[in-house]
Amino acid sequence: MQRSCPPFPRVANINVWRTSPGRLKDEKRESVPTWNYIAVHAYGVPQIITLSDSRELMDKMIDTMIDTYGSDSKSQWHNLSDNFREGMMNGIVGFEMTVTRLEGKYKLSQNRSQNDQYNVAHALLQSVDPNAQAIGAAMQQNLETGEQQ
């Protein structure tokens, strides 16, 4: 059984965002950055897809991937010569998988004080990075609902 991890928001925290009671935001102290994340692991038995197995499935998989993650490059992909595109597709190994189990997990600084969590969430919500904003929103929601893990 294999597992697949789709892209979910994750972001590194900068220590300056964390404060403990009685400490200034920019006061130096021993600590290291940590990652906050939201992840879902999908389990199942993957079926490999290569160009030699099925051109139709490979085309469909690539078109779906481009539509999802890079729609602005769709015309570029389709304007490539057939030989070049086929050479690229020969280097791709895709898969389909019937999901038999899902496991979700998140780490959103729950081990930190509420003040630290608030400061991290606030800083992440101010970021221009959509992943950082998503993590900040999830942290804020946890703080508002009082959910701690």
Image: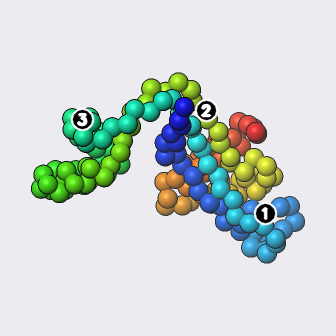
Q: Nearer the viewer, residue 146 or 14?
A: 14
Quadrant in which the C terminus is drawn: top right
Q: Residue 45's spot in the image, x, y percent?
A: 48, 30
The residue singled out by tag 2 in the image is 103
- Callout 1 amino acid: Thr
Q: In this rendering, does residue 114 appear at all?
A: yes
**Mark 1 vs mark 2: which is more N-terminal?**
1
Task: Please give the name of the residue rendered at 53% of the width and 35% of the height, measured from the top-left corner.
Answer: 2
x%, y% of residue 128?
49, 61
The residue that disc 1 covers is 19
Relative to residue 127, is residue 49 drawn left or right? left
Q: Disc 2 vs disc 3: Cβ atoms closer than 8 Å?
A: no
Q: Residue at x 79, y 49 (%)?
A: 111
Q: Closer to the observer: label 1 or label 2? A: 2
Q: Is residue 129 left or right of residue 24?
A: left
Label 1 to label 3, Cα distance in Å? Answer: 55 Å
Which residue has dot 3 on it?
54
Can you name the residue that lies furthest to the right here? 22
| Label 3: how many Cα within 10 Å (few below 14, some 14–19, many 20+) | few
Of circles 1 and 3, the one toward us is: 3
